[in-house]
Amino acid sequence: MHYEPTDAPAWAAPRALGPLNAVVELPGSKSLTARELVLAATAAGPSTLAGVLRARDTDLMIAALTTLGARFEEDGSPTRLRVTPAPIPFPVSRSERPTADATASAPARIDCGLAGTVMRFIPPLAALADAPLLFDGDDAARSRPLGPLLDAVSALGARVDYLAAPGFLPVLITPGTPAGAGAAGAGAGNAVAGAGAANARAGAGTGPRGLAIDSTASSQFLSALLLAAPLLPDGARITPTGRVPSLPHVAMTVASLRERGVSVEEPATGVPEGERAWAVAPGRPAGASTTIEPDLSNAGPFLAAALVAGGTVSVPHWPASTSQAGDAWRGLLPRLGGTIRLIQESDGAPVLQATGTGALAGIDADLSAVGELTPTVAALAVLASAQGHTSRLRGIAHLRGHETDRLAAIVAEARRLGAPARETADGIEVGALAAGTQLRPALLHSYADHRMATFAAIIGLAVPGVRLDDVACTSKTLPGFTGLWGRMLASASPAAPGREAR
Ligand SMILES: O=C(O)C1=C[C@@H](OP(=O)(O)O)[C@@H](O)[C@H](O)C1
Ligand SMILES: C=C(OP(=O)(O)O)C(=O)O
């Protein structure tokens, strides 16, 4: 892992000066926003989306879908969008380009930034466009895995040309010859008929397209094919090979498709891995009016702050039932030393409250289903190490392909603080600090990773002298993070003389 710390002035992570009593309103879920944007852009009719996350990842998604021909208009607020779907084939050839790209031969570009959702959800749609699309992103995005997904995109008949290393950005995707009008529901228009590569069993008109895909590196490969499947003339039957991480995110994709009337069959429980298939019927998703839930994964650092500083942090509008991975905080935080209560406000809206005392517990957990929660759990594990506890986080080898190699990053930063951490084949272990030893001040590295930035913020609540090289990368999913964090800390009761959060 190569990382050059930025030259930006370091952010001094604020310490908690006493127990908290804060209510933190979080913006919309990144994952739900990404799915709703794609579904609205490919729907049979217009949609209205409320509670949309406006952050770097989701604004890049809006830009990508605009290039495909969808239209997004703010309806009184940036978080409320009216969406006019794109025709299919997506009219990329007519998209407005920045002047630098506007030569006859330059393909339209999709900037993926560092967003897994953009770099995974858009390529299968590129197979349904009327012109080539060039995908690229941040430097760090160029080492995030894409190969198995792009094999499936070529199985859909598109041509995939890697411009640097095979399996990675940048890549040029050229759609195959469009088939005749497909049976893909109202206004679906044409869809691809490809010669089909080795892993495509069926062509258009002969039953659902069969796609086998190795999704061990990311559940987003599977979600990406599921989102494109209803736009294919005969739908698709998708069989992931190997163990799929982050299954709640796949369930979220299925739920979002079904909400818009798309028929998706999921594998029955008990079907062995490798034999499980998801079957999606053809037919454009329906236009819809949808309100997006707050981001429960991003709630994690704020809830964790209550455990570290003591006191209570409340997150309003916690959904009573949800497909978000972040709902797992209700089970995880009690194992790390907190108390969790889901209460009903007088207006009936549920609120999640995390309460803590500053005393933390170590944890041994398989986080494969909720990998994106790992940096926050790891921050608590590092602080628990200074209280004599060991922790083991398992089932998360795929985090090596997240925004950065998160296993290497967490271990490097934990060690910089003096905690005995090490990588295992599929996770990390954090040992207990020797009695009488404390974590030390450090300039921590973000690795351009929003969740490594919030990792540092959590540590800084309790360890004096923690600074972070680049807090701005939190804008990937949570613009305004430092303001929210500061307001939460301002709720601290003044510490008794001599007392500071542990
Ligand atoms: O589909 C999604 O919205 C996501 C799926 C997961 O990806 P991986 O399966 O690559 O972990 C998750 O970690 C990521 O933050 C968001
Ligand atoms: C893995 C993550 O993001 P992405 O959607 O870019 O994969 C994350 O947010 O933790």
Image (cartoon, helix red, strand yellow):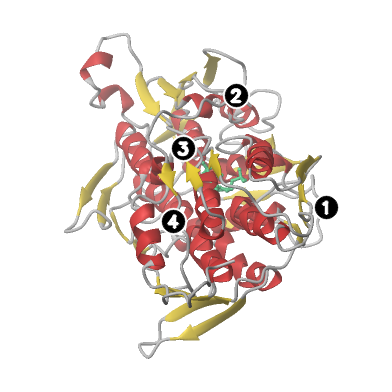
Left-right relation of 311 to 198: left
Confirm whether residue 248 shows in the render.
yes
Query: In this figure, which residue is indicated by the disc labeled 2?
Result: 2
Query: In this figure, which residue is indicated by the disc labeled 1?
Result: 272
Q: Which mark is residue 43?
A: none
Q: Nearer the viewer, residue 337 or 73?
A: 337
Q: CA–CA distance between discs 3 and 2? A: 15 Å
Query: In this figure, which residue is indicated by the disc labeled 3?
Result: 469
Disc 2 CB within 8 Å of nearest ligand 2 atom:
no
Question: Dot 4: what SS?
Answer: loop
The tag earlier along the polypeptide, 4 or 3, is 4
Marks 1, 2: nearer the viewer: 2
Q: Residue at x 32, y 8 (%)?
A: 105
Marks 4, 1: nearer the viewer: 4
Q: Residue at x 37, y 31 (%)?
A: 89
The amino acid type, in three-letter code, at marker 2 is His
Q: Position of residue 244 (x, y in %)?
A: 71, 46
Q: Looking at the figure, which quarter contains the C terminus?
A: bottom right
The tag earlier along the polypeptide, 3 or 1, is 1
Mark 3 and mark 1 residues within 8 Å of each other at the beta carbon: no
